[in-house]
Amino acid sequence: MGRIETEDVRTWLVDLDGVVWLAGQPIAGAREAIAAVRESGRRTLFVTNNSGPTKSVLASRLHHAGIDAGFHEIATVSDAAASLLKVSEDVFIWGEEGLVEAVEAAGGHIVDEPAKAATVIVGWSTSFDFDLLCRVSSAVRDGARFIGANEDPTHPTPHGLQPGTGALLAAVATASHTKPIVAGKPHEAMVNLVHKMSTGSLEVVIGDRPSTDGIFAATLGLPFALVSSDATAKEGMTDEVSPLCHAPSLLEVVNILFSRL
């Protein structure tokens, strides 16, 4: 493993859920894997489709996993979604604090009812009831712009898969007869955010979902390294994705990549 001595420092894009942790619980070997990447002279940019946590929470979880990262090293789907807003735009959020933080930072004005909103953003949330679905889908049918954080159907946890943001998004899309603008991987808003936050060149994408991380890598023109999780097993591979390597853990993937990049 040789250290990079050129001025063009390369960046590895690393997913979090299912790769570094499961529901915030660190996965064995993740700390050693990230340390090895950084010791090789490369940078890491953590790229997450989870809109629930704030950046402070994500940084705290990384620290708990033995990985120190500043906010400039964490690209969130919440920031990608907020980048699609106009300053002072009225926004209703079906989601948690990560989206609230990002929308406020982008200058959006958060309203308390979907009917008051110019834009509705649907992200990760454990609050789901028929009344809220009615109000959000009605607002979209009446002309509110419909932004979704991501289309991930499930969310990996230590106890198996839970419904993901994509499940909520599908409910609103079906009830409103409207296709959302999706901000997260593999879509344009996240692509633009990663380019904005990166220095040097991008070298590889590491993740556990072929349909998001894999296609994200293809969109960026980068190789894709697949870490197995329950999400991978349920989702399977797609014709659009051919991983450069595939292993059960981030540490194993990193060690393989060092021999191939």
Image: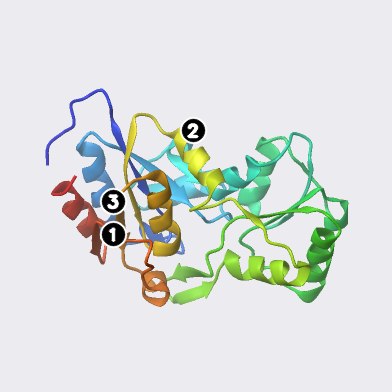
Q: In the visual, does 57 lie left or right of 235?
A: right
Report the Cα–Cα distance between label 3 and label 1: 23 Å
Depth order, front residue of 227/98: 227
Image location of residue 158, percent across then percent down:
41, 72
Which residue in the structure is indicated by mark 3? Answer: 31
Q: Quadrant of the N terminus?
A: top left
Q: Is residue 209 visible?
A: no
Q: Is residue 204 above or below residue 114?
A: above
Describe the element under mark 3 as helix, strand or loop: helix
Q: Quadrant of residue 233?
A: bottom left
Describe the element under mark 2 as helix, strand or loop: helix
Looking at the rendered structure, which numbered label has been put on residue 259?
Answer: none
Which residue in the structure is indicated by mark 1? Answer: 243
**Can you name the residue that lies furthest to the front here?**
239
Q: Quadrant of the C terminus?
A: top left
Depth order, front residue of 85/223: 223
Q: Is residue 217 visible?
A: yes
Report the Cα–Cα distance between label 2 and label 1: 25 Å
Report the Cα–Cα distance between label 2 and label 3: 26 Å
Looking at the rendered structure, which numbered label has been put on residue 196?
Answer: 2
Q: Amino acid at mark 3?
A: Arg
Residue at the (54%, 70%) spot, across then down? 153
* Label located before the other in sequence (2 or 3): 3
Q: Is residue 170 above or below residue 213?
A: below
Q: In the visual, does 215 lie left or right of 112?
A: left
